[in-house]
Image (cartoon, rainbow, N blue to C red):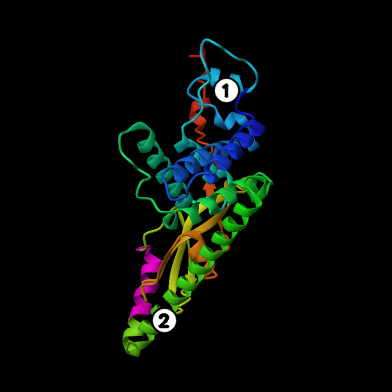
Amino acid sequence: MDWTHDLLWNKSKINAFTAHNQDKTTYLFPLWCSIALETLSRSTLAYVHPALLADPTKGSNILYVFGYYNEKEPAKSVPMKTVFERLTKIIESFTNKEYEICMNFMERRNRELHSGGSAFEDFPTKIWLADFYKICNMLITFQEKEMNDWISDEDTMIALEMIKNDHNKIKVLVKKLIKDHKDNFYRKPKDLQKELRESADKSRIFGIYPTKVYSSHINCPACKSKAIVSGQIAKTNEPTLDGEEIIRQVSILPTEFVCKACELKLSGYDYLQSAELGGYIIQEERFDAMEYYDFDPADYFEPDYGND
């Protein structure tokens, strides 16, 4: 079986080694990095279980994972889009932002390999390499390994420094954004400040804000008005029964922040974390038990037979 974690991990190491031995100014470096990212992503799913790599449209693909081979019909694995989608459910810090970065990388690789175009020709490392290392580090640490288990000590030192510098740049940028919006807000007349705060509070109450999946209310770090932070579900607790209701606790990873009063907007978990807004949002949901389990008593009712 070719989808074991060890095989995929070792192949990703070979691909990463090949990538880092290319001239980093040519298209070969990002091309081999994209191949290394694919095998590393697949090894991450295999670390959970190789069945996550099986294309579920045919049962034979799943049977292959458990040792039932069919040489006449080779097993088919899921496409990279599905791999990255599954990673957003498995690794909490692998958000939609990381998904989009990875998909963009794969689309470039596909254009490079399957067309006459040069997708990596005008693709300098300054616009992608820090993100690449950051995502790879997420996948590597999830597998309980270190970056220097994947690439050389010298390349590891460079990669970790780039990740650190990128994080520091974001912190500086976020700090400046907050300061600029704070200064602009408090330059306004006090009557206008009050009006903007009240308008923001109404927007919060009546749900005018655009949100992603789940949201919570919070004070803006710039103007202290009522604002909203939203995000995607990271995990849910097991539902419990309370009378005739089902209670479920949801943990949300914040990825978007919007303040209608001072117009401060932050997008991406790393930006919210730099603004000290990165903690989990915990919400409790309540459902009618029968609706939650899609249960209709009428489906189980059988009329008396022959008792007319």
Q: Secondary structure at mark 1?
A: helix
* Mark closer to the chain start, 2 or 1: 1
Give me the residue at 33% from left, 87% from top: 188
x, y percentage for residue 308?
Answer: 48, 14
Label 2 belongs to which residue? 182
x, y percentage for residue 151?
Answer: 62, 47
Give yes or no for residue 212 being in the magenta stretch: no
Give me the residue at 49% from left, 70% from top: 218
Give me the residue at 40% from left, 58% from top: 211
Q: Which residues are magenta?
A: 196-208
Q: Nearer the viewer, residue 111 or 256?
A: 111
Amino acid at the residue labelled 1: Ile
Give yes or no for residue 198 being in the magenta stretch: yes
Location of the N terminus by quadrant is top right
Classed neighbour count for the residue bearing mark 2: other residues with Cα under 10 Å, few (<14), some (14–19), many (≥20):
some
Secondary structure predominantly adopted by residues drawn in magenta: helix
